Amino acid sequence: MIEKALDGLYQSEDTLDGKIQIYEAEKQKILEKIGEASGRDVRIRLLADQLIDLVFEQIAESWDKWREELSDRIAQKSQYWNSEHSPVFSQDKLIIDYINQFIRYLSIEIDEWGNTKLKEVILQENIKYLDTNIAYELDAIQGEFNSLDQNIQTNFNEQLKLSMDGINDDFMGMGGIGGGIGIGTALAAGLIVFTGLGFIAVIVASVAATIAGSFGFGMLDFDGLKDQIKGKVFELGFQKFDESMDKLSEKLDEIVGSVFEKRVESASRVIAEAIALYENLLEQQEKAHNETLEQREAEKMWIYQKRQELEQIQNQLEVILNKCSIV
């Protein structure tokens, strides 16, 4: 930020000294470049919206296929559910054990789908396409600045490059896609709806009714009871899971939206800065043209003072950073 500010101050001083001059034809080109930059921002946003729609279509197709096979996979794993509690004497605790195991296996399944299908395939492919287009639009702006620098002896290209480097840091700072927490883990976290006392109470009541209608107190088949309890947990668990789709959909919207929004906003920030650089150049030229010699000298003195202040801050920061690196 200090380097960019210093570059801007040096440029202002050069403008006041008459080292940077823009003629009418060049001004018209700059105005056209401002319009083009705005158009690039719009194109990036429109593309992101289109890709988001495509992503949700692909998510729906992948999710439906995954959901069709999910019941069979959980059913196979339910054979290995276990508990030390009795289906008669500590039935509530047995039910809670089975519920926890159901949630655990369901969470694992969601985590795997979220990371291997949603993140690594669907999001990765579409984000890569968006990143390629963002890079194309920003590279075009940087190329235009490079031509401008050569024509009027400015350093816009260097100023914009600092922001371009920052956008790469933004993308990498997300851990690629999804940030520090895995997408699948974030989705599975929505399963907290299963841990409410109301859900447990429903299963307990349902199991109790099943047992009362199927068994007498003289001949209790404990293994049979456990299987029936497993079946009820399995049945009501999936019922609750399907009912919770609104919550999971909200989480999906949040994840997909944040991944695309982060990139779009970063690109828009760079484009807005490019436009500001163009506009600032035109304003400086107009101002320098209309100011008296006395006014220009006063402004140059102000620029000199601000430069000194920024350079002092920069030196202090370098001392601090050097000390930190030694430690």
Image (cartoon, grey):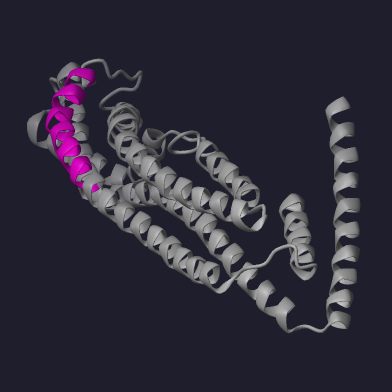
Q: Give, as a single range, the part of the protein colored magenta.
A: 56-77
Is residue 253 or residue 100 the one in the foreground? 253
In the image, 220 versus 274, the foreground residue is 274
Q: Is residue 172 left or right of residue 292?
A: left
Residue drawn at the location 85% of the way across and 48% of the way down? 314
**Left or right relative to 21: residue 32:** left
Indicate whether 11 appears above or below 251: below
- Residue 327 seen from this side: no
Q: Is residue 31 above or below residue 325?
A: below
Of the 4 image quadrants, the one containing the C terminus is: top right
Instruction: Assess whether residue 224 is covered by the magenta stretch.
Output: no
Q: Give the x, y percent position of residue 271.
A: 50, 58
Residue 4 point in image, percent of width and height: 71, 53
Looking at this view, is 323 or 84 the one in front? 323
Q: Quadrant of residue 323?
A: top right
Q: Nearer the viewer, residue 38 or 195?
A: 38
**In this rendering, is residue 75 above or below 316?**
above
Principal secondary structure, stretch drawn in magenta: helix
Q: Quadrant of residue 273?
A: bottom right
What residue appears at the point 26 percent right and 25 percent down from the top-left corner?
A: 87
The image quadrant that residue 9 belongs to is bottom right
| Residue 182 x/y as whole percent | 43, 33
Q: Residue at x 26, y 27 (%)?
A: 88
Seen as rendered, the residue at the extreme left is: 214
In the depicted structure, whether residue 14 falls above or below residue 143:
below
Residue 69 in magenta stretch: yes
